[in-house]
Image (tube, helix red, strand yellow):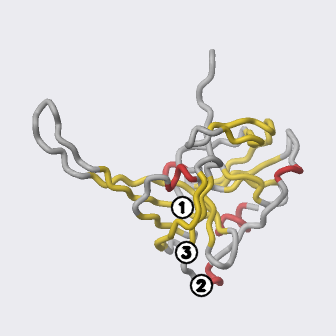
Amino acid sequence: IYSREAPGVVQVTTTSKVEGQADPFFGFEVPDETQRALGSGFVIDKAGYIVTNFHVIEDADTVEVSFSNNDSMKAKIVGKDPSTDIALLKVEASSRALRPLPLGNSAAIRVGDDVLAIGNPFGLERSATRGIVSAVQRPLRAPSGFTIDHVIQTDAALNRGNSGGPLMNAQGQVIGVNSAIETGGAG
């Protein structure tokens, strides 16, 4: 599955400008700063549409995607929904260069099903982690504060940078978008 589908997974790099402000203690101006953030995404069609998470592109001034052949290009944000943590990007690329991933039926998955998460954790190029569906119908708080229902929980290892990448079933079909890592809990 990885060798067939990884070329459809992209690295998403965003830049945003953080305005400087006066330091009240020392009284001098802190200069503007450019911040970069990394995430993942995946191609869904030959027209150049790419799915990622809203929180990956939320404050972006510019968005760039990098493909498996190391080609990078600017992407335009064409849709975003903070309440479901989903965003849609568009690149102007030759259809022959785009490798859309097949979409599956997330309603058909069951606890215990094998899954594969592909992404770019820590800015590293396309890695895969394997796991199972640990639970379905989990609630998750979106960046907007709304609750996303029917979330798939997996034990496949996810790290910073995996956000926006595909969660795939054993047939190599996308059944979800990797979005959050639960690291805490009452102990």
Q: Nearer the N terminus, badge 2 or badge 1? A: 1
Q: Counting other residues with Cα less than 10 Å from the Cα at mark 1, is it few (<14), some (14-19), or many (20 or more)?
A: many
| Residue 101: percent from left, percent from top | 73, 67
Q: Which residue, given by chain and number where applicable, does mark 1 sit on?
A: 11
Q: Nearer the viewer, residue 136 or 141?
A: 141
Q: Where the N terminus falls, by quadrant?
A: bottom right
Q: Counting other residues with Cα less than 10 Å from the Cα at mark 2, is it few (<14), some (14-19), or many (20 or more)?
A: few
Q: Is residue 91 left or right of residue 18?
A: right
Q: Nearer the N terminus, badge 3 or badge 1? A: 1
Q: Is residue 174 left or right of residue 83?
A: right
- Secondary structure beneath label 3: loop
Q: Nearer the viewer, residue 162 or 131?
A: 162
Mark 2 → mark 1, Cα distance in angstroms:
18 Å
Q: Residue at x 50, y 49 (%)?
A: 122
- Secondary structure beneath label 1: strand
Q: Is residue 152 left or right of residue 59?
A: right
Q: Label 1 sits on what residue type?
A: Gln
| Residue 59: percent from left, percent from top | 44, 53
2 and 1 marks in contact (CB < 8 Å): no
- Secondary structure beneath label 2: loop
| Residue 139: percent from left, percent from top | 72, 36
Q: Where the C terminus falls, by quadrant?
A: top right
Q: Which residue, given by chain and number where applicable, does mark 2 sit on?
A: 94
Q: Residue at x 62, y 54 (%)?
A: 86
| Residue 25: percent from left, percent from top | 14, 30
**Number of the label disc, if any, that sits on residue 91:** 3
Q: Residue at x 61, y 42 (%)?
A: 142
